[in-house]
Image (cartoon, rainbow, N blue to C red):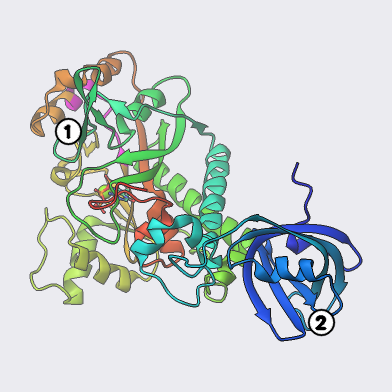
Amino acid sequence: MDDRTYTADAEPGDEVTVAGWVHEIRDLGGIAFLILRDTTGRIQVKFEKDAMDDELVETGLGASRESVVAVTGRVEEEPRAPTGVEVVPESVEVLARADTELPLDPSGKVEAELSTRLDNRTLDLRREEGQAVFEVRAEILRAVREAFRTAGATEINTPKIVATGTEGGTELFPITYFGREAFMNQSPQLFKQLIAGSNIERVFEIGPIFRAEEHNTPRHLNEATSIDFEGAFCDDHDAMDVCEQVVVAAYEAVAAHCEDQLGALELAEGFSVPETPFPRLTYDEAIERINATGELDEQLVWGDDLPTEGEKALGADVGGHYFITDWPAEIKPFYIMDHDDDPEVSTGFDLMHPRMELVSGGQREHRRDRLVEGFEQQGLDPDAFAYYTEMFRYGMPPHAGWGLGAERLVMTMLDLENIREAVLFPRDRQRLSP
Ligand code: ATP
Ligand code: MG
């Protein structure tokens, strides 16, 4: 049905129909230009008022900005045109007229507030930069899937409506499920473990997670996309290896395939694929280095979670992606395995970008007795999780995995200020629509 020519494919000498939005009309008097924009770029349409049919000229130049038009005509070489070619129209059809007052300027000349942009995403993503973010996001997800396949993992989809949360507690959104209380899932954690224990062994999932976090920060959403991995017979270091491969694959794919998008975002110059291997700092080393920066008012002591300013100070000190390993068991969830020779220390790890946390992972406790003990220690009722713990009776292999926030990956890669820029329709404390 779509037999038009993309503006990027229009070659001199072609008879084409191009279709898209009226980006701009430049009226120079006897001659006027309509700049037509489609998903591939823009093309100039030339109107010579005296030499052309009046109705044609009126229709073309009368179309308001952002109206959708189809133009049929001949492509000619024109060195003065932005793309070196222009269309000499034979017919112009207005397919959808746009109101003359627009809530934001899709040419980007007038900057709009983020909330205005999010309220008007359709218009907002007519801007090159907006489109570029989501083209890059798609490329990242494509590359991530491919990297997982290379690593021998199978894509799975687990339920988002659940009877119990992953870690219990306050971050759950309750819903009503046929008269019973249910929740939106915080993480595919328990389900992916159950499948890593099946003969599928290595799994990954890319799907939504829901967190009823009260805070409103530039790096938290209430609905985010989690890129998850879980592998049987993996330990924490194997899981970190896969994590590093996946993150690097995403950067490499964007470097190789998103030149135009990086250009639109003014990142083409400085864009680089992170160097491997990522340093692996123990938690002990991390707090020592943070304390040594002198950036914190109070020195951190063993057992503290890392405050945001601490993460930033360490990030600036390290200067690239890095792992923090061997976290205190107490501040990691019950399903993370502790070291046998020192149960105060866990196999939990985080992957950090200098700006923020990207990933949490670890080796999992696969020994049922200890797992159940862990539930009790964290004040959770193991019976509520019987669907999970029961499977540990029937041969659960050692396994490890992690979860990576897709929006944080996009945000840090593209140096976006606010995570909401990396989601089409973000969910946060204020925003439930669109
Ligand atoms: P943070 O401490 O930054 O709030 P977290 O430790 O609570 O994150 P995890 O439960 O470890 O988050 O989830 C794994 C990853 O999922 C995080 O490292 C992050 O990339 C992403 N993630 C978690 N919660 C959110 C959220 N609310 N919004 C966006 N991404 C999130
Ligand atoms: Mg975490």
Residue 331 placed where, x, y %?
Answer: 15, 46
Near-viewer residue (220 or 317): 220
Dot 1: few (<14), some (14–19), or many (≥20) neighbours within 10 Å? some
Task: Decide: is 374 above or below 369.
Answer: below
Residue 251 placed where, x, y %?
Answer: 53, 58
Near-viewer residue (22 or 221): 22
Quadrant in the picture for residue 413: bottom left
Look at 28% across and 54% down and name the residue there: 220
Residue 276 placed where, x, y %?
Answer: 48, 60
Quadrant in the picture for residue 416: bottom left
Near-viewer residue (140 or 348): 140
Residue 281 placed where, x, y %?
Answer: 30, 59
Dot 2: few (<14), some (14–19), or many (≥20) neighbours within 10 Å? few
Identified by mark 2, the residue type is: Pro
Look at 31% across and 41% down and name the residue there: 362
Mark 1 vs mark 2, foreground winner is 2
Q: Is residue 133 visible?
A: no
Residue 168 is marked as 1
What SS does tag 2 mark? loop
Q: Which residues are magenta?
A: 362-371
Identified by mark 1, the residue type is: Gly
Left/right placement of residue 332 relative to residue 416 reads: left
Quadrant in the picture for residue 286: bottom left
> Does 89 lie within the magenta span?
no
Look at 78% across and 66% down and name the residue there: 56
Q: Earlier in the sequence, mark 1 or mark 2?
A: 2
Left/right placement of residue 256 relative to residue 14 reads: left
Query: What is the spatial separation of the Cα atoms under label 1 and label 2, in whole angstroms?
Result: 65 Å
Look at 36% across and 36% down and name the residue there: 400
Identify the residue under disc 2: 79
User: Which residue lies most toward the front here?
Assistant: 54
User: Which residue lies most toward the right here?
Assistant: 13
